[in-house]
Image: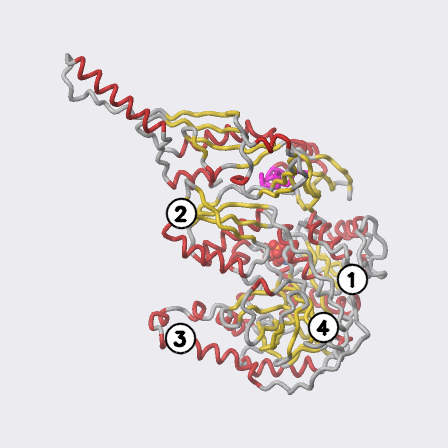
Amino acid sequence: MRGALCRPDVQMRPCLRPCARLPRLPPSRRLPSSITTSCQQPPRTLPGRAGFSSLASLKSRQNDRARRFPALRSLSSSQLLPTTAPVLARYNSTTATSQMPLERKAIEIEKRIAAIPLERYRNFCIVAHIDHGKSTLSDRLLEHTGTITAGDGNKQVLDKLDVERERGITVKAQTCTMIYKHRDGLDYLLHLVDTPGHVDFRAEVTRSYSSCSGALLLVDASQGVQAQTVANFYLAFAQGLSLVPVVNKIDMASADVPRVLEQLETVFELDTSTAVKVSAKTGQGVGEILPAVISNVPAPVGDAKKPLRMLLVDSWYDTFKGVVLLVRLFDGTLKQGDKVYSFATGNEYIVGEVGIQYPDAVPQKVLRAGQVGYVFFNPGMKRIQDAKLGDTFTNVGCEDIVEPLPGFEEPKPMVFVAAFPTNQDDYGRLADSIAHLVLNDRSVTLQKDYSEALGAGWRLGFLGSLHCSVFQDRLRQEHGASIIITEPAVPTKIIWSTGEELIVTNPAEFPDPDDHRIRSATLYEPFVNATVTLPEEYVGRCIEICENARGVQKSLEFFTATQVILKYELPAASLVDDLFGKLKGATKGYATLDYEDAGWRQAQLVKLNLLVNKKAVDAVARIVHVSQVERLGRQWVTKFKEHVDRQMFEVIIQAAAGRRIVARETIKPFRKDVLAKLHASDITRRRKLLEKQKAGRKRLRAVGNVIIDQSAFQKFLSK
Ligand SMILES: Nc1nc2c(ncn2[C@@H]2O[C@H](COP(=O)(O)OP(=O)(O)OP(=O)(O)O)[C@@H](O)[C@H]2O)c(=O)[nH]1
């Protein structure tokens, strides 16, 4: 959430181009620019070509593996080389210089970059609401600079995950270096970051801003300013980024450019005389963007002659290279063989390879101050936990004279679910798949969990509901996993009468109603500050929805004659309860929502249990506000009844809030005709058989021995 992520310690820059003044901004501190001390570094030998041969060596390793393990021969190259093969495939199909082998291409790029001074570097990202065209515009810029060739196969080149392409959303910020020949005839080194628009991935956005000094503020000409435009604008502004207004989708019949320009002036007080009007789809006007970036975005500050000061922006795991780091160099240079020191862990590493994303990994001899690129070590960094995002690296021996950069605040997961394999035999395989995904998504938290009903599983924490659903999709798509996922829930804070605190993310850890301590404890739930933008005619309905979600209105402002910004303080639980879906439904899809962490608020919370023959189904339990128990309890018992088969005995389904039963349904038993073969007149025998049947039922009921099929849970837990 934004509150937890934005950097209150980053100073606002005195000059903001083109906008000069803005109210209501958080205090911030300037990004450190340079240090004045110097450091004697040991003489280094120039790296040989070894760094460039990594691809060849990977391929020969692949062949070697295939020779040793014949079963691997049937696998595709992408299965054998999880990172490099798709990279190569796309590189070959997309890169303008793609006909060249990787090594030649690397040398060519290196020559051009070496001739570009720091004053001609520009690091920028695209700030926009979801779906306003960031990834499409990135494609056009990559084509415009010849980084990739135009063509149908090149849609959303920077959206590398399957789930991103399938859903058409950016989940992971991606970076790309471009070399641009400007109108002045000189080469400029541009570094572009395509960021996600959705609020769940705000951590990615914030981190990306730290490697940039400017941003394109992109707005859809038909939709105008929306919730995430506002939120991302304030984040970028607080980081001191220089903003270039860009109006996109001008090819659309519904485009209203003058209205959008007016909004940019009114909402952000931006000077729109320099705004660029484009269609990322057709390419119209795209040629004007990079000249605007060059004139408005300042070159990064840094000194290549100083000791290394390098910020760790992102990381991912590669089977062969170990952890690969995406870094921004503030000072110094980095090349193969350099020894570096991590301020966060105190570990030392030897650089194995450095390079740039162009848009895929292209090795380079050296990275210089101001550049953003990748590095991996030799021997490789084994544990992803050692790559602490926001960490500063310097040359070994310079740790006492180099001041580390301010890091990032780790995002806190706010949505928790439990996950279980559909078939317990798959536990081991699913554990591997989850571990693999968690390696590359640092914001997911993972703990082992166990449910009597569903067996061994895990409790996973996510940044939001979309983050959770993207993770599930990736598990299914990339690992073919079949899982049961419980309903998402937010954490609860308990402050005991002794003053001690406990954050409960698993309802199983919530104290029993019989536990005397809970009666004197105070309970808290997380709240968010939500910003909703919507057309004026739907205001009444949206207010009703927010109030029903226990929201407290903070403000209602018109930012144009027909558009409203509504601000509410809301329980975070309402977001997992599909508040956004309800708002969209009420506004024909026009409402947009953004939110930031507003901290904990005291609340009357209770654990709601689903009981089957008096026995709690642990996987279903939730901690909810007292006002919700009746509605949710009724919903649960009705839905559960639909999915449980009739048994030989009566099944009682109840919802219990603490000790209070709030809803009940009964499934009548099959009555087996035990008297079928009996002669009608044999009264004693008849009574005996009926009594035996009754006792048998009683015994089963007493142990709550209800056989519930796994598919019943799946259907119950699926929306
Ligand atoms: N007509 C038209 N459609 C566009 C234009 N730019 C983007 N689109 C379409 O708008 C949709 C969203 O574009 P994306 O580039 O995925 O948007 P995004 O901002 O990267 O989306 P997120 O990463 O999910 O925030 C896609 O269907 C694009 O084809 C444009 O200039 N004109």
Q: Nearer the viewer, residue 332 or 2?
A: 332
Q: Nearer the viewer, residue 307 or 21?
A: 307
Q: Quadrant of residue 484?
A: top left
Neighbour tally class for label 3: few under 14, some 14-19, many 20 plus, Cα within 10 Å: some
Q: Within the magenta stretch, is there residue 47?
A: no
In front: label 1 or label 3: 3
Secondary structure under the numbered disc 3 in the rendered image = helix
Give the labeled residue for mark 3.
65
Lower position in the chain sequence, tag 4 or tag 3: 3
Secondary structure under the numbered disc 2 in the rendered image = loop
Give the labeled residue for mark 1.
242
Magenta stretch, residue numbers: 570-585
State which image quarter holds ligand 1: bottom right
Give the labeled residue for mark 2.
422
The residues tagged by marks 3 and 2 sit, at their Cα atoms, a distance apart of: 33 Å
Q: Residue at x 73, y 57 (%)?
A: 217
